Image (cartoon, rainbow, N blue to C red):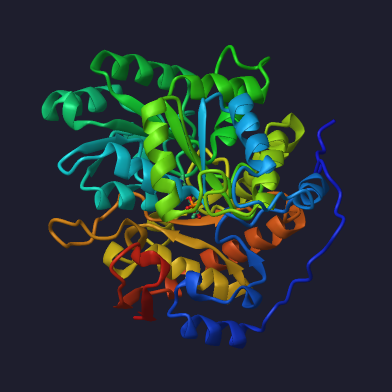
Amino acid sequence: RKAWAEPYRIKMVEPLRMLSREEREQKLSEAGYNTFLLRSEDVYIDLLTDSGTNAMSDYQWAGMMLGDEAYAGSRNFYYLEANMQKYYGYKYLVPTHQGRGAEHLISRILIKPGDFIPGNMYFTTTRQHQELAGGTFVDVIIDEAHDPASTHPFKGNVDLDKLESLIKKVGAEKVPYVSLAATVNMAGGQPVSMENVRAVRELTARYGIRVILDATRAVENAFFIKEREPGYQHKTIAEILKEFCSYTDGCTMSGKKDLLVNIGGFLAVNDEEIFQQARNLVVVYEGLHTYGGLAGRDLEAMARGMEEAVQEDYIRHRVLQVRYLGEKLQQHGVPIVVPIGGHAVFLDAKRFLPHIPQDRFPAQTLAAAIYADSGVRSMERGIVSAGRDPKTGDHRYPKLELVRLTIPRRVYTNAHMDVVAESVAAVYQEREKLSGLRMVYEPTYLRFFQARFEPL
Ligand code: F0G
């Protein structure tokens, strides 16, 4: 059959509230035209992020009741550890409150001042921790990733020539690890192929360099491999995930995405020495090494989420729902990043608002306009997110100037997606009326979270 539906039914509902256009304009101005500063209750459909916004299953909620809230040695930790070993295949687990807690630990342990960390496009918090540890991030993703119109099936791939020339230029001893993300969030939720991760492993092995995976959305990545890469159609998502991880030396994880929870993360490694250091540092910054800033019940929910994340009908529906929204937008002629990624549809603000120069924040302007139109909340992923160059102090001008419509897992139906598509199409019709923003407040770190703007 052609028709497909949610592989679950709804057991509990949360009513939504819709403000009037005038009220939304008022709220937007109070929030400094930054969707991060809106109150959730003023939002109708919240596509700000897929992070921590997932709906947990009855199986996960039942697990919450089995939380062992002992300070040390909670049984939920051991269950999570066993599931991590089963599904991701690494030896050692250090839980953290969320992904950036793990990024902090691994950056501190492996990076020395003056080091270079190559990666397949930056992610905001990942790069911030690399820089705070004294490192310099170097983008080694394939060129196609920076082109929103390129239909390359694995736009998250590492460019092996870029990677090898960096290693030759600075010397292998100055490259503590390759920071490999799957899927690549900032490129549009684009996957990395198995062939590519295998090649990255071979290349780095020759130089004795580690590969640390950002496994935040690696299950979604596995779905794309199954769909697109020859030889994987008959493998299970769990088999693909484990093979992918086997080419890396460890991972940081934000459980708030793939693992279907509201909070949680971890660092996993194979090297015992690194594990010992991480286990020691985690008690300083997060909490004891068997809870890492989480309650026992949170560890249990994440362990159970791991089991659900790799279920074929779940992950298929997940990615197809994102695609459903993207294809609706394409039917309206709205410019989006292709291929449609795993967790979000990204509007191409450069083509949507070609009359607004990048230093007038076209993506920020567009995200604000969509909220004003319908109460749909999205996120800027362009010049504001890219921040300033720490050496020159100038804006970084990323090639991609995007607005992300991020779909929480198991939360909205396709009818919500229809409303979103209609609203974005309406803003597209009226796009010439938009004229950009001016930044009036800029915080030091990760400015996109708290910056404030005024209309021009
Ligand atoms: N890595 C990736 C690829 C991410 O997308 C995120 C978070 C993190 C690491 C950090 O994890 O939030 O648990 O500390 N991304 C969220 C987003 C915030 O909206 O894309 P965290």
Vertical side of 266 occupied by 333: above or below: below
Task: State the residue at coordinates (40%, 34%).
Answer: 276
**Quick one: 245 or 365, which is closer to the camera?**
245
Image quarter hosting the N terminus: top right
> In screen coordinates, is 252 left or right of 40?
left
Task: State the residue at coordinates (79%, 52%).
Answer: 65
Task: State the residue at coordinates (26%, 31%).
Answer: 176
Residue 406 at x, y = what percent?
Answer: 57, 54
Image quarter hosting the C terminus: bottom left
Residue 435 at x, y = what percent?
Answer: 37, 74
Q: Quadrant of residue 447?
A: bottom left
> In screen coordinates, is 352 left or right of 425?
left
Residue 186 seen in the current view:
no
Vertical side of 252 occupied by 153: above or below: above
Residue 453 at x, y = what percent?
Answer: 37, 78
Residue 203 at x, y = what percent?
Answer: 30, 16
Residue 272 seen in the current view:
yes
Q: Quadrant of residue 114?
A: top left
Q: Quadrant of residue 222?
A: top right
Vertical side of 162 occupied by 263: above or below: below
**Quick one: 7 or 18, which is closer to the camera?**
7
Task: State the residue at coordinates (65%, 76%).
Answer: 41
